[in-house]
Amino acid sequence: MKKRTAVIKRKTKETDITVKLNIDGSGKTKINTGIGLLDHMLELFAFWGLFDLEITAKGDLKVDIHHTNEDIGIVLGQAFKKALRDKKGIRRIGFAQAPMEEVIGSVTIDINGRGFLDFRAGGSEIHKLDARHLPKSQDGYKLQDTKHLFDSFAKNLGMNLNIKAEPLNLDLHTTLEPVFKALGIALDQATQIDPRRKGVPSTKGRID
């Protein structure tokens, strides 16, 4: 099997980002986004997904983290899409749960070519949560920022991504860590090659 690797570079007036990915890796990482909590979460994602992942990002963090965070999701999605090529033989669907204290992160994935995100915490969609009940930001990073990251990732990979964190812990780290672990495990499942599958895993015969 050919190596499923990709290098994607994206430079705008707001950010300069490079992602190097090996889907069939061993979980090695070298990540520097300028956002400490995000670095840690992406390291967990790659470790549990067994992806070799390097990310370097420079952005207008003096303004806020929005552009850097969103653009990392864009480039990460593009890297996975490129590395998967025509998607022949992949399992396509993956699902996983991971715990941290009382929080269970649940992730279900379908790499179907159609980007879609549903992200709920504490039983509610993120944008519907009362601000008083949201975890405090850490390193300037908020729960809402994670939604922007995942939305960009899902749309640029072409992935149906459903995420739940139950219950919502007021410590952001505790809420997010099981989600990123479960995301890595589920995406590893979805990108694995099934030797029984001889073509693209779609009755249409292709996945865009």
Image (tube, rainbow, N blue to C red):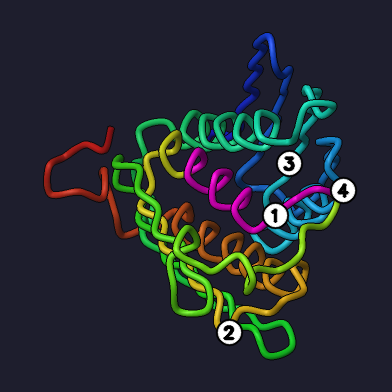
Magenta stretch? 140-153
Instruction: Quadrant for residue 110, please give it.
Output: bottom left
Tell me: 152 left or right of 139.
left
* Camera-side mark, 3 or 1: 1
* Element under disc 1: loop
Across and down, in percent, residue 207 comes to: 26, 38
Residue beneath disc 3: 53
- Residue 10 among those drawn in magenta: no
Residue 138 position, x and y percent, is: 82, 57
Q: Amino acid at mark 4?
A: Gly
Magenta stretch containing residue 147, yes or no? yes
The residue labelled by disc 1 is 142
Q: Nearer the viewer, mark 2 or mark 3?
A: 2
Q: Which residue is mark 4?
A: 36
Q: Residues within 10 Å of mark 2 (few under 14, many from 20)?
A: some
Q: Secondary structure at mark 2?
A: loop
**Which picture quadrant has residue 18?**
top right
**Mark 3 and mark 4 residues within 8 Å of each other at the beta carbon:** no
Q: Tell which tag, 3 or 4, sits nearer the viewer.
A: 4
